Image (tube, helix red, strand yellow):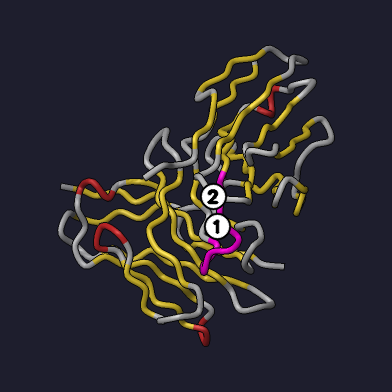
Amino acid sequence: AQSVTQLGSHVSVSEGALVLLRCNYSSSVPPYLFWYVQYPNQGLQLLLKYTSAATLVKGINGFEAEFKKSETSFHLTKPSAHMSDAAEYFCAVSDRRNKLVFGAGTILRVKS
Amino acid sequence: AAGVIQSPRHLIKEKRETATLKCYPIPRHDTVYWYQQGPGQDPQFLISFYEKMQSDKGSIPDRFSAQQFSDYHSELNMSSLELGDSALYFCASTNSRGSTDTQYFGPGTRLTVL
């Protein structure tokens, strides 16, 4: 069985500060890992994905994530937060061609 | 680029009524997934279809059924609606012949049961 744990249901950063959203996964097979972003009352937009290629994955809007097998982590980072980054972020895991298992989500607040 | 289309976007029903949600996948995508996201919750997998056959089943109530049609669109049928069925229902599609099987999500259907 696969699972995802997102540490911190709410994260608050100042505009221009580093964004770090934590995700740890559990999987019995080599995982595929994803980060999705959800703006209020909208659908899920793919930010980036890890599929066993490069361990450092770059996504849209300046986000990136690093797959660390030894730590079973896939933390999401962005060097400089922007007000438009305020949203809810979901980490998800799958074992290919199968359902996504989501974490509980982290709400990112960006202070001006 | 074409995205996943879901209809209706909003739906209000009374308890014990039925509802049908529709999903039109991205062209050439052969796999459809349905997820339910309750208020303040993460999305939970309900059911998936590959080439018109059910491929996986999650926490879908017996009151719900779904199918995928020959044009690959999918419908989620919900009967005897309960207050707890109020949620955002997402459809996602993927091309199983693709290299990464990334699931692309539609905008969701917000179901409110009164």
Mark 2, secondary structure of its residue: loop
Q: Which residue is depicted at the point 76% across and 41% down?
A: B60
Q: Nearer the viewer, mark 2 or mark 1?
A: 2
- Residue B95 shown in magenta: yes
With A93 as the anchor, is B54 left or right in this view? right
Q: Main secondary structure of the magenta part?
A: loop
Which residue lies under the disc numbered 1?
Answer: A103
The magenta stretch is B92-101
* Residue A45 rendering spot, x and y as whole percentages: 41, 49
Residue under numbered circle 2 = B28
Up-down relation of residue A21 to residue B34 (above or below): below
- How far across and down, in percent of the image, does residue A77 sit? 31, 67
Q: Chain of mark 1?
A: A
Residue at x 40% of width, y 50% of height: A37
Q: Chain of mark 2?
A: B
* Residue farthest to the bottom, as pictured: A70
